[in-house]
Image (cartoon, rainbow, N blue to C red):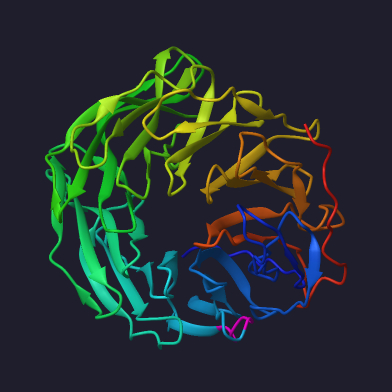
Amino acid sequence: MMVLTSPRCDDGRVRFRLGRVLGAAVVCCAVAAAVAYGLSRSSSRLLSSDQAFVTEAQVAAGSDGDAVAVWNQQVGEGGSTLVVSSRNSVSGGWSRAHTLYGTSNATTFDPEVVMDPSGAAVIVWQPESNSPRQEIDGVMRASASAPWTAPARITYGTLPGTRELSIDDHGNALLAYTTGSSRSQRVDAVSVDARTGRWGTPAVLGRSTSQLSDPTVAEDAGGQAVAAWSTSRGRVRGDEGDYRYNSWVEATVRRAGLWSAPQRLGKETQFIYDASLDATLNGPEVAVDARGSGIAIWQHSPARRRLIIDAATVRAGTTRWKGLRPPVAREAIAPQVASSPSGWVTLAWETGKSGIATKSGPILGCCWSHTRAFPASKAGADFDLHLVAGPGHAAALAFARSSRRAALGIQSPHGRRWRKLVQVGYKPGRRLSDPIPLSLAVGTGGELLALWTQERPSSSPGLLASPLHETTADER
């Protein structure tokens, strides 16, 4: 049984601009808080029950302020329920949170949500199972005003490891996941039309007699897609008691509805500092622009105790990946990548000095910017990084800071300069935990939503009394 925490906070909403459009609806509650760069306060409202234990909040944005937030919620003893709240551009407010799926003695895991510009949306999650071969369930809606369908079983027999969900501008969602047995494993992808509710036949992206893990997928507005995953080569014991996990990164491309043969991109290496190997590996990351060009990034260790970022790209209309010169040749941990529709890519990673760093450039790899670093505070490390891209060259990132408020950064839509970090959440201390970012989303007009949780151990339920802090850090 998963151990659930009980984040609680009162709700405050502020606005900011990512790209050219002002008007991001921002939500702060026991589940999520959203803050924008402009810091102009609007009305506030609690989304989740103030008596609930809340985890794994995720958000997706459409156009004109449409959005969906989903989270796991436990009230009292027993299992958890999957809860959703929607923001409609017509009403301008968030709906009352309601249960999509619930059980009396089981738990849901890892909800994901995607939304197209019209408000069509798909949510998937993993129900609790005693079998090592897991299931994936899902619901969908045809538009922002349509009801959610009844929960349906999407696929059986999936294996532990991350899965990823994406959607194009026509409501066609794409889910990549691993399946098979210890002797033969596959990476599959299945599509669904959110407007008709029909799931297609799964396509096999790759197969192996060794372990496959961490599939990731992204698609453009018209449904051209890229996908990547890790193929295990085993692990070795390091000099300092850690384990080095070695694998290959493989990738494929979908053009005109057909997936290309998988291509091996390069070696992948990640360090695990827990001998039990319970740590979750990050795996590769992919992004795609509006024309279908894609980029894949991953970690590699060309020398002992050193991690860099390797990358490969694929041009629109082609299926052949081309390796790039490593965009980051210094210590880079848990890298992420995001591409704007125009093809401006932003990379972000945790540094070896416990800070956060970024660089950006065109999706096909030419002319990367200089590295921009956000040094860690003296109080501790920065971690739990999340990254999204907006219009033009815009991007946003959020990360937790030990013993401090979480940080939200915004990159200019017309340049490579990051604006001042915005501090969000309540100041830790007095039995109040660090605020932990969970999810970022950008609407088609540039509206940015950021979600986080913050836990306050307490024997009695209730909202935090203090207001949302809106202080900003000095520009670095």
Q: Nearer the viewer, residue 401 or 94?
A: 94
- Magenta-highlighted residues: 92-97
Query: From the image, which quarter does the C terminus lie in?
Result: top right
User: Is residue 468 shown left or right of residue 347?
Assistant: right
Chief secondary structure of the magenta span? Answer: loop
Residue 396 in the image, given as x and y percentages of width and height: 60, 47
Which residue is located at x 58 percent, y 43 percent? 385
As drawn, 200 above or below 383: below
Residue at the image point whose x is 36% and y is 68% from the top: 124
Question: In the rendering, at what x and y percent does residue 366 appear?
Answer: 42, 24
Q: Is residue 148 above or below residue 245?
A: below
Quick one: 320 or 397, which is closer to the camera?
320
Q: What is the quadrant of residue 175 in the picture? A: bottom left
Q: Residue 177: percent from the left, percent from the top?
A: 27, 54
From the viewer's perspective, tell me whether residue 321 is left or right of residue 290: left
Tell me which residue sits at (72%, 29%) in the image. 375
Number of numbered discs overlaid on the protein picture: 0
Decide whether residue 296 is among the magenta residues. no
Residue 95 magenta? yes
Residue 216 at x, y percent in the picture: 33, 47
Residue 104 visible in the displayed image = no
Q: Residue furthest top?
A: 303
In the displayed structure, would residue 23 be above or below residue 360? below
Seen from the viewer's position, the closer of residues 95 and 279 is 95
